[in-house]
Image (cartoon, coloured by chain):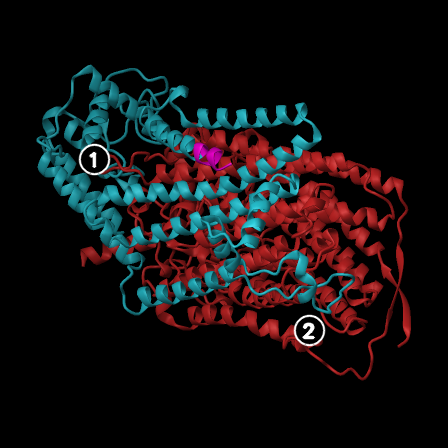
Chain colours: A red, B cyan
Amino acid sequence: MTIEKFRYDNKIVAMFAWATIIWGIVGMLVGLLAAFQLPFPVLNFDAHTTFGRIRPLHTNAIIFAFVGNGMFMGIYYSLQRLLKARMYSDLLSYIHFWGWQLIIVGAAITLPLGITASKEYAELEWPLDIAIAIVWVIFGINMFGTMMRRRERHLYVAIWFYVATVVTVAVLHIVNSLAIPVTLFKSYSLYAGVQDALVQWWYGHNAVAFFLTTPYLGLMYYFLPKAANRPVYSYRLSIIHFWSLIFLYIWAGPHHLLYTALPDWAQSLGVVFSIMLLAPSWGGMINGLLTLRGAWDRVRDNPELKFYVVAVTAYGMATFEGPMLSLKSVNAISHFTDWTIAHVHIGALGWNGFLTFGILYWLIPKLFNTNLYSKKLAGIHFWLGTLGIVFYAIPLYWAGITQHFMWKEFTEDGVLRYPNFLETVVQVIPMYKLRALGGSLYLLGSLVMVYNLIKTVRAGKMVANEEAEAPALEKNYVAHDDHWHRWIERRPVQMLIGSLIVILIGGMVEIIPTFMVKSNVPTIASVKPYTPLELQGRDIYVREGCYTCHSQMVRPFRYETERYGEYSKPGEFVYDHPFQWGSKRTGPDLHREGGKYPDSWHYNHMLDPQTMSPGSIMPSYAFMIDDDLDTSTTAAKIRAMQKLGVPYPDGYDAHANKDLMKQANSIASNLEKDGIKVMGNKEIVAIIAYLQRLGVDIKAEKTTASVN
Amino acid sequence: MLISLSAWAEDNSQATETAKVAAAQPPDWAMNANTYLIAFIVIVLLVTILALFRSSLKLIKKITSFCIVMFISGSAFAAETTESKEVAKVTAAQPPDWALHPNTYLIAFIVLILLATIIVLYKTNMKLIKMIAPHAFDDEKQTAVEGAVSGVKNRETFMRKVYLRLVDSVPVAKEQDILLDHDYDGIQELDNNLPPWWKWGFYITIIAAVVYMLAYHVTGTGKLQAEEYADELAVAAKQKEERMKNSAENITEENVTVLVDAAEIAKGKDIYEKNCSACHMADGGGMVGPNLTDNYWLHGGGVKNIFKTITYGVPAKGMISWQAQLSPKQIQEVTSFIMTLHGTKPAAPKEPQGDEWKEDATATAGDTTAVASAEAAVK
């Protein structure tokens, strides 16, 4: 047995650590801005900083920049040590690092410019999507290359989770991002309406699963026993909860679409798989917490262990709450309200945030061969963070439940008690202020950490290449397995294929029938494609991120149909590339907005929402009145839509702009009747055209039917 | 801990009730539930901060654990509050056959799970306390050990047996027996059994999933959303029928009259300011909507036509229907208020629109508009 000498690459770990910290602070700051914009709309400074553009910037920054870099930091550190090998290729490591940071910078530039695909957590446009796919594959190659050169026969449970992450994120990202490009900065989703919604939430839910959960469970399995210096509680529990988790998770996406136009069978699958997901999720929590048996006294002195305990507990809470929110009667309350926002922040602030902080407190001193500058400051950070989470979550739970009960309350006369949606918003604004306070505390804690870590780094010296040694793997290995699962732990490729098969099943069973079986989306004859002007208006709606506050999905409840009109039918969305159902109602649903108010109402409302709805917290979109509509893209957009199967007549692209101007001028003259002078070629006219079209096709159907 | 938890939950349910009350009689801040919540949270914050600064390091740790528990219980109770509200709704809607309602069982199930969770969380909390003050439970441990040794069978040892059965883990002292020969960068693994409570929980969710699918998609016992909605509408229709029967004066556009009572006009003014002034301006001068102070009416003047226009709206012209939002009585009130605007001098009157209205022209004008709007809708 020859002992081989090699060196761990610590530099790449440190680089990812800096990126984690910097983007983490940036992401939290942007989040704080969004949080303050809700109670104080004056903070929507200009077109680039409206809530509709800031909110996607925040979610993308936290998920992909903060947690993403945190994941890479932890994986690059632990993978090398668990495999007793340096990363496969330094070049690939650096391409991965710089590629990922460039994508983040790209996101930070394009999202405020309104360049967005409008699919939640997948807002980036197609060139960036391709870059993500390439960098991700490079990461995968680097990881598998390292496995091939490993000096450890078996793959540890952390690595199973890493493998599942790499495979699944690739599948999710590619399938969900498929789109027809129109220009360099604009594309249309390959899917429409119900199908687009299903694919999006299959992705969205599993972005939570395979970007925020599985890699972090892997990190937990390395860093928690390391810090506690205790053996992992149960190897068998690791096996069972790993496979059941990745198999069941992928099915649960439709629970984001309960009581929508998604077919009932798909909704029910989402419900039952979410219920079954409870135990596998808790498997991770109990394996983590029970690993601390006999080490609880050490939690007193180790700041990292304190953070881990809260992180794992928050994980357990969020994964208990998740299945509960998937029950239809509970979901009816939580969906579209702030309850969901509170729920995800238990996960993001508690689980991802605290686990990352714990790792940083442990890792940075190790990388710099020194001790943490101040345990006391780490304790203060722990405190501020925990209080921050409490102050963030409780007001939003309160707000969500309050708002729901206000939405659904009828008077004895059988009319809505709060017919004006705004009343239900004004009621929860104090909660928004408290939430912003919670966020501020959390950010303050993070800044304390930054100071602490800078001081630590100053005191030490980076060990860029850490010496290590291990025996090479024997050529003639005879297995003497204590468990059948050892077999696959020796075979990275089989592990990859195994997890790929396991995660494909759920997605295929749900997605394929929704696309192939016609009865899932019954067509409605009166639903027609958008006119060129409406299409342009719709793209403005997408650009402004209106979906971040307005849903387009009237659910089949009396309190919704009384408020908004007929509930939404699957056949109404067949030309919606991408769908705009939304997931949160900070403002009212807009699916039946068409014809509800005169054009001049919309004009005044866009100019200054407070004039039409006193007390409204919607930002002003006055710039739409000044900005010319870019009609140079109309022909390309029509052609792209035709490729997607939208039945515009052949050659319509050539004279689409003529129709566009005709409709625009008629709206302009309509506005003029109410004393508003505006040229037909302004963006405001297009957005009014789109809003007036929303949900009216089905009304035509009804009237025709009743006349006949 | 548990006492503080329940006290807190109680506090919240009270506050929720206040919220309902506050909603009915809006502006007074003292009636607003949010005020109390904010006060409550601020007090919690102040107390914790005070405690933080005044106490020794040990105490800080204790409070930390308390905070974690508050945090855990916070989300648990948030879910619980919802459920209890659901129960209230269900029983209020159809008190006699609550036993038949599927939600009852669902809620019972959730409550059971919640109770179990609270117990688990309580246990976790105890662990946390042990970690912070390792000697806090020495006495208890002593008795437990003594009990086991002497074979005394009291309730505690029975509970402990059940607990050990459910957890089924090898004690730390004996873990060498189940230590696997796995070693990953110094990390070892134990071969503890799957915790039975976890394993059985998993089985139960699988069974629940199968039952759910069967109930909703095979036997048809469970109602899918379209059917639920139809039921909801049927209940509402029945309630409406009841209301119609009971109300002596059932106001329609046929029999509506102008109110003259100042209090009722004031109510109408309030409704107008909340709902109408955005388009018609507070003084009725018109902006998006037409001027309501002049002699000209697009859809007919007079109490009956105005009532009708407000009730059904004229969608083609941008006037929305208010019958889902305002009761007939409220529409009568706001109609009466609007009629008091006639002849007043608004700050910026919109030019006249529609036909001049004379009080004796009666119903014909109204009929034509109705026909016209119906035609417009068809188009």
Asked which quadrant contains residue A53, the reply is top right
Apparent side of residue A382 relative to residue B345 in the rendered image (left or right): right
Residue A221: x and y in percent read 68, 58
Horizontal and vertical percent position of residue A30: 64, 39
The alpha-carbon separation of the residues under discs 2 and 1 comes to 67 Å
Residue range of the region highlighted in magenta in the rendering: B1-8
Q: Amino acid at mark 1?
A: Asp
Residue farthest toward the front in the current orientation of the protein: B150
User: Which numbered disc, 2 or 1, marks the residue closer to the eye?
Assistant: 2
Instruction: Give the main secondary structure, helix, strand or loop, of the magenta stretch.
Output: helix
The answer to which of marks 2 and 1 sits earlier in the sequence is 1
Q: Determine which residue is flagged by label 1.
A: A413
Q: Secondary structure at mark 1?
A: loop
Which residue is more in the foreground, B175 or A11?
B175
* Residue B222 position within the rendered picture, expressed as x and y whole percent measured from the top left: 29, 61
Q: Say whether residue A86 is left or right of residue B98.
A: right
Assign a secondary structure to mark 2.
helix
